[in-house]
Amino acid sequence: MRKGMTTTAACVSALALSAGMVPASSAAAKEPPVGKITLDVLTVNGSGCPAGTAAVAAAKDNTAFTVTYSNYTAQAGGDSKPTDFRKNCQLSLGVHIPQGFTYAIASADYRGFASLAEGASGVERANYYHQGSPQSTPVSHTIKGKVSDNWQFTDSTPVAELVWKPCGVDRNFNINTELRVDKGSSKPGQTSFLSFDSTDGSVKTIYQFAWKKCPKR
């Protein structure tokens, strides 16, 4: 894979645990829990992820999980349809983790491919949250043409602002993503696109876990 554009942004989130939720212990776990993590796509909605085109998998070392899209491309210009300039996807995931632990998302690596004519631009936008918790503030990144390369953006959350799944209860994890392309001042007939896919099909969005042990009752 070619070395693409890389940007890191700190997500400033106003999330807080709702009243009545059981907090995790104050000390984060140094190592991921031992045991199997399973993830299931419970619901999927949006023009960027038709049924059967989004898949999730946990890393073998329990440090992260990945989301892979196989038909997620926004485009504008040329023969593009008027609705092609914006694609979005809303995923609701069932995340099953070892007992005695809870998790937060420390960072997310969004990756894809951009082919933007001179004068065109594209925007990647995303946020995520636990079911029943406020949504995190969406973070956007802009790519300007002329460019034809892989891209990557990393959104990181400060440790003090991590939002943990409440201990002892099942909560779905929700992910919202969006791609937009503006043909801008590019020449008539030129097609520009922004994709969560890659030319070799190996690009995945990676969500890094942070772990805590739940307090003993």
Image: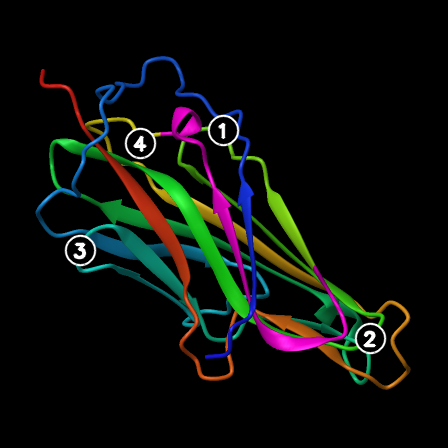
Q: Is residue 12 above or below residue 196?
A: above
- Disc 2/disc 4 C-alpha distance (Å): 44 Å
Q: Where is residue 62 in the image (x, y as percent from the top left)?
A: 20, 51
- Disc 3/disc 2 C-alpha distance (Å): 42 Å
Q: Name the residue under label 4.
A: 165
- Disc 2/disc 1 C-alpha distance (Å): 39 Å
Mark 4 residue type: Lys
Give the mark, 4 or 3, whose residue is nearer the N terminus: 3
Residue 157 within the segment the image draws in magenta: yes
Q: Where is residue 184 in the image (x, y as percent from the top left)?
A: 87, 67
Give the mark, 3 or 2, whose residue is nearer the N terminus: 3
In front: label 2 or label 1: 2
Q: Mark 3 points at which residue?
A: 61
Q: Residues within 10 Å of mark 4 (few under 14, many from 20)?
A: many
In terms of secondary structure, where does tag 1 sit?
loop
Q: Is residue 190 above or below residue 42?
A: below
Q: Name the residue under label 2.
A: 118
Mark 2 residue type: Glu
In terms of secondary structure, where does tag 2 sit?
loop
Mark 1 residue type: Pro
What range of the chain is rendered magenta?
143-163
Q: Residues within 10 Å of mark 1 (few under 14, many from 20)?
A: some
| Residue 24, numbered circle | none
Q: Mark 1 points at which residue?
A: 134
Q: In this view, does 184 lie to the left or right of 179?
A: right
Give the mark, 2 or 1, whose residue is nearer the N terminus: 2
Residue 153 within the segment the image draws in magenta: yes
Query: Residue, x 56% and y 44% (percent of image)?
Result: 9
Give the mark, 2 or 4, whose residue is nearer the N terminus: 2
Q: How crowded is mark 3: few (under 14 residues within 10 Å), some or many (20 or more)?
A: some
